[in-house]
Each structure stands twice: as structure tokens, then as C-alpha cells.
Amino acid sequence: MKIAVPKEIKNHEYRVALTPTGVRELIERGHRVVVEASAGEGSGYADTDYQSAGADIEQDIDTLWRDAELIVKVKEPQPDEVARLKEGQTLFTYLHLAAEETLTRGLMASGATCIAYETITDRDGGLPLLAPMSRVAGRMAVQAGAHSLEKAQGGSGVLLPGVPGVAPASVTVIGGGVVGENAARMALGLGAEVTVLDKSLPRLEVLDHRYQGRLHTVYSTADALDEAIRRSDLIIGAVLVPGAAAPKLITRGQLGEMRPGSVLVDVAIDQGGCFETSKATTHAEPTYVVDGVVHYCVANMPGAVARTSTQALTNATLPFVIALADRGWKQALADDPHFLAGLNVHAGQVTHSAVAEAFGLESADPHRLTA
């Protein structure tokens, strides 16, 4: 199969879909991999690294997209990329369609088969291709929040760990999943006072046991959230409804209850954000202020640490890319119901119920498409 790896063109996106090591695995299985010139530079991989692994380097973007059977990316396709997609091609990348109606309809119009990393599941109910970037984003959220608390950044001037004689910052993490635990772990490591809110008592029990009481776990209710809003210096939104838009947990009216210079970091921004006042930002202009509260809502946070992120992403996605290349999308998805959960759009039809519901569209049964 002819596999294309384009250069990412989203603002300040430095990741690339496959490392040279991943490319070599595909080449050794008899596939052809074509990498766009300089696609790996942001992650520290030169064109010669890919050539040494057996890849071809393509200078012309139109040729790269036109000839590909399988296109492997990191972020959702931008408008110019959507325009290049066509029927018979398979796109494998992060999509986050429930927050992007224009993108959803563009992919439908392309006729391509579009498989999303973030909705593929595993036997334990986890999201194995979202998890590595969730770990990165969770840890980065604390770094970003700590920086945003600095007075020069518009924050309240609070140092996350405090100093002897001065109390540490209060950090609340909403959501105890992969993002939330990694954020909590990072904040604890920096010496902050950390509370995690979640509606799953079993999950809270796991976190309580794992961190031996150093982490405060609180069942998430409206009252618990109100208290967190009043006392927190930094709130990290780490909620996820797989494939669907994120619920809005903090309204604009509630911002007035927060201390001036407090910080909101919305890691759910790819799915529309979990704060009413959230809007996607970029690494070029990562923050803005609403009612005295600093908002950090970068939609591709892991792109800032591209080397680590690219390696972690390839480790997770490579078995799935191999399955698509070896067997084709239809057989690969038919063989694995967890992989099938990643199918979002095919031949003009939305195949993920949460995406269809978000835009009032009819959802096609993915099982019938692979039968």
C-alpha cells in the first residue's frame, strides 16, 4: 500500500505522524511510504532519516496527496487538506469532529474513509490512541498553568509550590482520567495542593490509593465545583465524553467568583471546551483574559513538545497503521470491533453516533459498511 505522511500545517504544530523507526516497520512489510519534504524537522527528524528507513521524499504536496491510498496525520485536516481528499482514500488521524461541523461536512463531501485516533477503544474501555497525547497534555497543562499564573502573563503572581512560610497554590483538576491523573501527578510533584473532582467513585478510590492521601479526591457535584471555583488558583478542565462535545462545567457568570488572576486551562478544547468562555487558541497566542480570569486553551498542546509526542504517538498508532496497510481499512476494522469504533466518516456518511448527534445528522451503522 502507498502510505503518505504529510507535513502538519496547523499553527505551531511540530509533530509528525510517524518516526523513521515506524516507517521502517512498514517498509519491511512491503509497503511504500512517501513523506513530505521537511515533515519531520519539527520533531528533530531530517529527510535523510526517513530515506535511510526506506521512505521516499516528496516535494510536491499535490502529488503526495493525489497518489496516496492511506494518509497518516497527527491533527485534523485543514481546509486545504480537506480539499485534496478524495473517494477511495483512507485518512487516519485525530479528528475531534463533534466540535467541528464544517470539517465534518467537508470530510463527508470528500467521499474518503476517515478514521479517528481518539474514538478507537480497547478491551478495558480505554482510548489507547488518545492516551499518549492525553498524558502529554495533562503534564503540560500544569506547566502552562504555572506560567500563566505569573504576573507578567496576566496571572495573580502565585508560585505553584509556594515557599517556606507561604502556602502553595491550590490546583483543582476536573476529571480523573488519563489527562486528569497526569495533571494531578505533575502538580503534586511541583508541590501544589491538588484536588481531583470526578463522578466515578471507583476512579477516585484508585487515585486515593495510588497517591496515598497526598491527593484530595472529591465526588463532583455542583457544590463541590462552586467551592473549587472560589478557592482555586488554577483549574484544569480534563473531562472527556468519547467522540462527543465536552460538557460546559463553568459558566461565565461563575468567573466572578474566582480570584482575579486565577487561571483556567481547558484540555478539552479539542472537543469544544469544558468552560463556557473557552475558545481555541494557538501556541502563538495561547492565553486571553475574561472577567479577570486567564484562559489557556491551546488546541494542540502536545505539539510544543514534538519530539516526545511524536515518539509516543507512533508507539501507539503503528500497530493500527500496519493493520490498515496489510489488510485494507474494511478488513482491518471488520477484524477488530475496537478499531471499528474509530470509523467516523465513510463515503459521505457519518458513522459515529456522537458526531451525528452533535449536528443532527443520520448515523450510518459502521458494522454494515464492513460486512
Image (spheres, grey):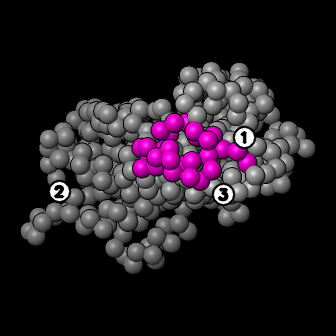
Spatial separation of the CA atoms under disc 1 and disc 2:
51 Å
Asked if the residue at tag 3 contacts the one at tag 1, i.e. Cβ–Cβ closer than 8 Å, the answer is no
Which quarter of the figure has residue 289?
top left
At a point 56% along the width and 52% down the height, the residue shown is 52
Residue in front for this viewpoint, 211 or 324 = 324
Q: What's drawn in magenta, residue-wise?
A: 31-57
List the residue tagged with mark 2. Answer: 159
Which residue is found at the position 14% from the left and 48% from the top?
157
Q: What residue is shown with label 3?
A: 25
- Label 3 SS: helix
Foreground of the two, 352 or 369: 369
* Left or right of residue 253: residue 307: right
* Image coords of residue 83 (percent x, y): 62, 21
Q: Distance between the residues labelled 2 and 3?
A: 46 Å
Please report the residue visible at 26 percent of the width from the left and 39 percent of the height from the top. Answer: 294
Q: In this view, does 293 lie to the left or right of 361?
A: left
